[in-house]
Image (cartoon, helix red, strand yellow):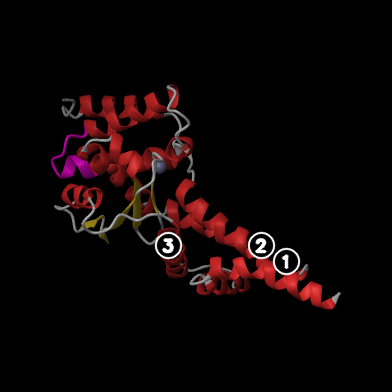
Amino acid sequence: MKRITSLLFILIWFPVLSYAQGAGNLMQAVLDGINSATLSDAQVAAYSRQAVQQMDAKNPVAGPNDPYTQRLNRIVSRHRTMGGLPLNYKVYKIADVNAFATADGSVRVFKGLMDIMTDNELLAIMGHEIGHVINHDSRDAMKRALRRSAIRNVGASTSGLIGQLSRSQLGGLADYLAGASFSRQQETEADDYSYNFLKRNGYNVMALATSFEKLAKLSGGKQGGRITTFLSSHPDSRTRAERIRTRARRDGLAR
Ligand SMILES: [Zn+2]
């Protein structure tokens, strides 16, 4: 009986260990985090970096010579930094219409999004995502997710299920990164950040409006079951596009 239990233990743990390889530091950090009353911004950035590394390991990342990477390089070539953050971006070759940024300033853009957006629209969306980082939305959301995970994890460890729940916890953090949703106010402020970035650098600000209009069309039409995470975490695309258009008209920038 004991032997069977041990075998089961190994069978259950093996995939958990291979999944968590390279993520041990993150797990330890999360467990340490629960012991401290507050998570510092630097800690949150470090956890975010590790979580995004996990995402990179799990997803098909476009290589340096991939046409998608080269296109994104071209699009952001004028900008080493955005809002003082060194640009750190990669393309996931996944059909989802999605993009996200994490508290450490990492930006990940999905192939599905790149396929439907123009260069300027992609820059506008990256500006929006960086806006969430600059405005500390990403940091605050990551803090909440880390606390929740740590609490779940500690609860789990007392019942001896720490391995299994660690796996779901890791998955949860990674999923969170790709689908974090913010308040309407935070979205408006991230839109404004992007608008100001485009305006300051002489780009056509209408790209922000047209990117949202494309997203609105996607959410209205049938897309053959294509997963559109960005849409579900960014509702009201049409309203937001209209707001950008109004602002552009006021600024004499509606083209
Ligand atoms: Zn957003």
User: Could you tell me which residue is drawn at 30 percent across and 32 percent down?
Assistant: 211
Q: Which residue is mark 3?
A: 57
- Kindly indicate the quadrant of the structure image that contains residue 153: bottom right
Q: Are marks 1 and 2 in contact (CB under 8 Å)?
A: yes
**Mark 2 Cα shell of 10 Å, populated few (<14), some (14-19), many (≥20):** many
Is residue 25 found left or right of 83 in the rendered image?
right
Q: Amino acid at mark 1?
A: Leu
CA separation in Å, label 2 and label 3 = 20 Å
Label 2–label 3 contact, CB within 8 A: no
* Ligand 1 image position (quadrant): top left
Distance from label 1 to label 2 (Cα)? 6 Å
In this orientation, which residue lies closer to the viewer: 247 or 202? 202
Rendered position, 58 above or below 97: below
The quadrant in which residue 251 appears is: top left
Q: Please state which of the two labelled residues, at mark 2 or mark 3, is closer to the viewer.
A: 3
Q: Is residue 144 visible?
A: no
Give the image location of residue 42, x and y in percent.
Answer: 42, 69
Quarter residue 5 falls in = bottom right
Q: Of 237 and 159, which appears nearest the observer? A: 159
Q: Is residue 38 left or right of residue 137?
A: right
Is residue 35 found left or right of 135 in the rendered image? right
User: Where residue 21 appears, x then y in whole percent?
Assistant: 52, 71
Tell me the element at label 2. Answer: helix
**Type of amino acid at the residue the image marks with label 2:** Leu
Q: Mark 1 highlights which residue?
A: 161
Q: Residue at x 17, y 29 (%)?
A: 253
Residue 165: image tag: 2
- The residues colored magenta run 197-205
